[in-house]
Image: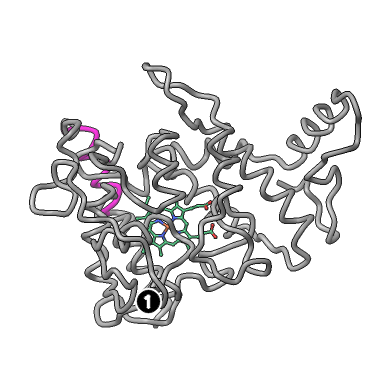
Amino acid sequence: MFVLFKVAQNIAVFTWDVGLSVINLVTPNRREGHVTPEGYPGFGGQWPEYVPPSEGDSRCCCPGLNSMANHGIISRDGKNIQFKDLNPLIQSTFNFSPSFSYFTCNYAAQLLGKSYTKDTFDLAEINLHNGIEHDASLCREDTALEPDQGKPHERYIRDLLESATGNDKDGNPLLVAKDISKSLSKRRVESRSNNKDFTLDFSHRTFGSSNSSTFLTIFGGRVKDLETILLEERLPEGWESRVLQRKGLTLTTFNLTTVPRVSLGISEKKYLAEKATADAAKPVAGDNATTPTSSINGADPTSN
Ligand code: HEM
């Protein structure tokens, strides 16, 4: 019975989402500078005061949720957050569509065995390994190597930002889809080599592509903004979502456009081949290598 209810619920959410995607196609976009709605934190680019987390605060592996707590958009200590209260705040802060935001909050509630309408959670609960959280992330060390998933991993984040090959019209660096794909490939190779407990099944590969695709949509790939958002988990002054669509970023648009561009570009095999070529071109071959040229743990890097 519960399975049937879940199927019906998902059909309803996806139908709603397709409807919102169609509305986005036929209505004008929000105006730049007016994306965050009036009456919500961040209206006019004015974010509530940023206070970094202190001892005892609950934080998680998600830079989006941690930023909301650091600005007091959700409870500053990251505790006792109602799923149903989080949903509209994700919409207003990042311009996710109501269907996308509801789906994510409801998914998180189900994952934690909680009720979307009645229950609360602490951010750290989202760190459940191989729930949504997974190995080979772009902003966190693997759980087996760093149990505190609330901490940004500075080197991984800097590597990601330095990999940007795009530019905006003023020449500022931009991350583009192929940069994200290459960074994900690199992190998978590294994790496979460094973490003896490494796992990454199909669903977690999908979460990886999907979470990191928000770098391109919500954050527009802008390296300068992402540096602040990912390293400090702070929304820069004047920041607003780069998604301008009236009804926000829908699951349909996201999963038909950005996510496949990122996913299809991921190849550990290609990353290893490029790295081998680059290493061979170095004057003294074989030194300073930080990533392996073959996989360990018996896993086959050519499979994705
Ligand atoms: C209920 C809502 C949400 C839940 C349950 C959630 C959960 C997660 C989890 C578990 C991760 C870690 C995945 C990993 O191991 O790499 C993650 C990463 C991430 N999330 Fe969220 N998230 C939510 C909302 C958001 C929002 C609103 C944003 C804003 C754009 C966001 C952006 C990201 C980004 C950029 C990453 C990092 C990906 C990476 O390191 O590769 N998330 N999220």
Identify the residue under disc 1: 122
Which of the 4 image quarters holds residue 44?
Answer: top left
Counting labels gives 1
Q: Is residue 55 magenta?
A: no
Residue shown at the point (45%, 73%) measured from the top left = 124
Residue shown at the point (40%, 43%) measured from the top left = 254
Asked whether 246 or 50 is in front, the reply is 50
Q: Position of residue 106 (x, y in %)?
A: 34, 69
Q: Is mark 1 within 8 Å of ligand 1?
A: no
| Ligand 1 in which quarter | bottom left
Residue shown at the point (17%, 54%) measured from the top left = 41
Please, what is the dominant secondary structure of the magenta stretch?
Answer: helix
Which of the 4 image quarters holds residue 253?
Answer: top left
Q: Secondary structure at mark 1?
A: loop
From this view, report whether residue 65 is shown above or below residue 156. below
In the shown orientation, is residue 216 left or right of residue 154? Answer: left
Is residue 11 at all visible to an observer of this figure?
no
Residue shown at the point (26%, 47%) measured from the top left = 95
Q: Which residues are magenta?
A: 16-27
Q: Residue reaching furthest left?
A: 39
In the shown orientation, is residue 278 left or right of residue 152? Answer: right
